[in-house]
Image (cartoon, rainbow, N blue to C red):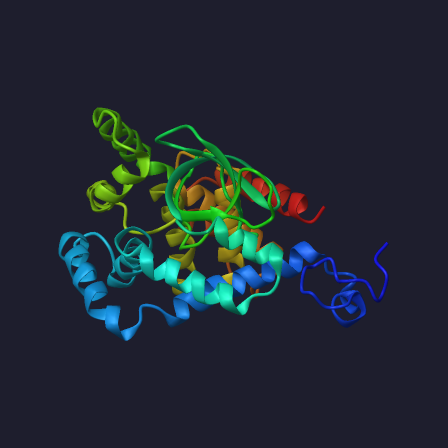
Amino acid sequence: MVGRNDKCPCGSGKKYKKCCESKQTVTIEEVATEELERMLQTFYEEYPERKDIQEYLDNANNWKRELRTFYMEEMIEAIVMDEFFFNHRPDIWQGYLEKQRKKILRPSVLRVLDDWQQPRAFIGEVTDVDDAFMTVRMVLTDEVIKLRRESEKPVPVGVHVYCFILPDGTGSEGQYLAVSSLIFFPTDHKQVFADFVNSFNEQEGQAVQSFMKEYALTFWKMLGEDHYEGGEFTNFEAGVLLSVIEFFEKQQIQSEALVEFVEDFLVEQQPNARKEVAIAAGAIRFGQEKGYYEPLEMTLKEIAEWFDVSPSSMNKYYKELLAYDDQKNV
C-alpha cells in the first residue's frame, strides 16, 4: 500500500497525498493515457507550422489532382495531412515529441515517447471485436494487433481499416491506437485489398513501410476506381438507409435516432435480405411501434405497399429489429 508521504507511483515525483490520492478511482494507467491523448490532439491543432504550410499544400494539391474525381476535398486533405506528417516529413512529428519531452516529468509517459518516434501505416482486416479493442490482421504481412476502438459504434468482422498506428502506451504487447483518422471500408471493396496485396508480393524484397509510402496514392486511386467514395456502409446498407430517409422526407418525419439504430442494426447484424426496401419497411413499423415518432395515419398494409414489399417481408425484419433491440437492452 502506498503511504501518503511516499512518492506517487504515477511517476510525477510528488508525494502521493499531493498527487493521485484524491483520484483513487482513477488508475495511474488512465492518467497517463489521458496525457498521451491530449498530446496527440495538440499536435493536430498546432501543425503544420507556417514555414511548412506551402510544402503541405504542394503535396495536397498533387493528391487532389489525382483523386478529386473520387473523393470530397475534405477527405483528401485529411489523408494527405497524415501522409505528409508521417511519411513525407516525419521530422515534424519527431520534433514535436522532443518539445513534449521537455515539458513532461512523468517517466511512464516519457518511456512511451521512445516508442512513438515513427508511426506506421497499417491496412488490416477486422477479425474480432470486443468492448475495448478490435483484433486486426495486417493484409500485407499477416501481423495481428489489438487496435483500440474509438467509439462504441458497432464494428463488423470482415471490414478493412486504414490508419497510422502507435503503441497504445499501456506497455501491453501488440496493443495499438490510431494516431490518425481511423478509416473503415465496407466489404464491397475486398477485391481492392486482394489486388493491393498482390502488388506488394510482386515487389520482391521491398519493406512493408517503404511499399506503403511509395504506393499510398495508388492505393487510394484503386479504391476510387472501385467506386469507394468515403462512406462506411456497403451499397446494400446505404440503400436501406436511403429508403428510410426518403420515406421520412415524404411523410415529413424527423427521427435521427431511428436512423442511427438502423445503422447499428445493419452493421452489427449483417441481415441477409434480397430487397433493401424490405428492411426499410420493417424499420418504419419498428420505429412507429417503439415510439420513435408520432404514429402515422397509415395501416401496416399501406406501409408495406409504399415500399412495394409484402407484409410478411416487412414483418420478418420488424421482428429482427425487435430482437436486436432486446439484445441491446439486456
**Left or right side of 266 for 133:** right
What residue is at 48 percent from the left and 44 percent from the top? 266
- Image height check: is 256 above or below 51? above
What residue is at 38 percent from the left and 29 percent from the top? 141
What residue is at 26 percent from the left and 37 percent from the top? 211
- Image height check: is 23 above or below 132? below
**Left or right side of 182 for 268:** right
Where residue 195 sits in the image (x, y, percent)? 25, 30
What residue is at 21 percent from the left and 61 percent from the top? 60
Furthest residue in direction bottom, as rendered = 50
**Depth check, front residue: 245 or 12:** 12
Where residue 16 sits in the image (x, y, percent)? 78, 65
* Residue 141 visible in the current orientation: yes
* Residue 184 visible in the current orientation: no
How many numbered tags mark residues here? 0
**Depth check, front residue: 114 or 150:** 114
**Depth check, front residue: 253 or 60:** 60
Which corner quadrant of the image does residue 3 belong to?
bottom right
Which corner quadrant of the image does residue 213 belong to?
top left
- Image height check: is 106 above or below 178? below
Where residue 113 sits in the image (x, y, percent)? 50, 54
Point out the image quarter for the N terminus. bottom right
Where residue 77 sits in the image (x, y, percent)? 27, 61
